[in-house]
Image (cartoon, grey):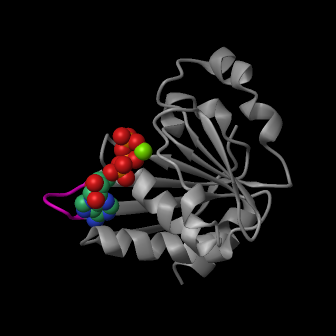
């Protein structure tokens, strides 16, 4: 069960760079225990945003891998981060088998692409980010905070 939505923002991102810069700002703000779920079609820009987040969190560039080949990547930045992609998973048992659930907690921040594949992967309090194509290089980003810390995080990210 999610906490109720406590804050919502929408922003139009006109270019890949706009998405990247927004990611950098989020990466500067993330703290251990934060969970960010990323939702959107193929090519919507989830990974692109995460690369910005990693930069903002001071993850060495060489550490940021293509997320296509594994389910969960650890990044050592200013804080520990995990970047997960649930695209290839089908259900909660699958997720259990990856060990992903053991990683959730207070020591790392989590960035999870395709959270909508397995919504139960999210903790009660989290930030949900949905990206949509709106023609060409434009994207619309919807950010929804569930719970107190995600609401504070969102307010700092998009004042
Ligand atoms: N405004 C934009 N924001 C983000 N990416 C954009 C934008 N405009 C164009 N792009 C391009 O769209 C692509 C987004 O790819 P990305 O891998 O981030 O998508 P994804 O949502 O992670 O897809 P997948 O579901 O396959 O993992 C990149 O090639 C990026 O350069
Ligand atoms: Mg991706």
Check the image and name the residue furthest to the bottom.
Answer: 159
Q: Residue at x 66, y 75 (%)?
A: 29
Quadrant location of residue 136? Answer: bottom left
Please give the range of residues in magenta: 133-138
Q: Which of 38 and 4 is in front in this view?
A: 38
Does any portion of residue 125 appear in the rendered image? Answer: yes
> Residue at the right extreme?
106
Q: Does the magenta stretch include residue 39?
A: no
Residue that sits furthest to the front in the current view:
62
Tell me: residue 132, above or below residue 72: below
State the image coordinates of residue 85 (x, y, percent, origin top left): 53, 38
Question: Quick check: which quadrant has ligand 2?
Answer: top left
Residue drawn where x is 50% and y is 32% of the image = 69
Left or right: 38 in relation to 136 = right
- In this orientation, does residue 143 appear? no
Report the quarter where the C terminus lies: bottom right
The secondary structure that most of the magenta stretch takes on is: loop
Is residue 10 shown above or below 124? below
Q: Residue furthest left?
A: 136
Residue shown at the point (30%, 67%) measured from the top left: 16
- Quadrant for the N terminus, please: top right
The number of callouts visible is 0
Residue 25 lies, in percent from the top left, at 54, 77
157 or 88: nearer the viewer? 88
Q: In this view, does 132 lie above or below 17?
A: above
Where residue 82 sits in the image (x, y, percent)?
68, 49
Residue 44: x and y in percent read 32, 50
Residue at image position (86%, 54%) is 106
């Amino acid at each position: 069960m999610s906490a109720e939505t406590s804050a919502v923002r929408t922003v139009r991102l006109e270019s890949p760079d706009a998405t990247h810069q927004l990611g950098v700002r989020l990466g500067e703000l993330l703290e251990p225990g934060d969970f960010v779920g990323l939702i959107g079609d193929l090519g919507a820009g989830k990974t692109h945003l995460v690369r910005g987040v990693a930069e903002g969190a001071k993850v060495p560039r060489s550490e940021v891998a293509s997320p296509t080949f594994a389910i969960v990547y650890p990044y050592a930045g200013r804080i520990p981060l995990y970047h997960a992609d649930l695209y290839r998973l089908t259900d909660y048992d699958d997720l259990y088998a990856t060990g992903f659930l053991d990683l959730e907690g207070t020591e790392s921040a989590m960035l999870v692409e395709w959270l909508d594949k397995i919504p139960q992967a999210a903790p009660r309090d989290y930030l949900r980010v949905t990206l949509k194509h709106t023609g060409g290089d434009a994207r619309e980003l919807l950010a929804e905070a569930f719970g107190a810390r995600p609401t504070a995080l969102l307010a700092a990210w998009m004042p």
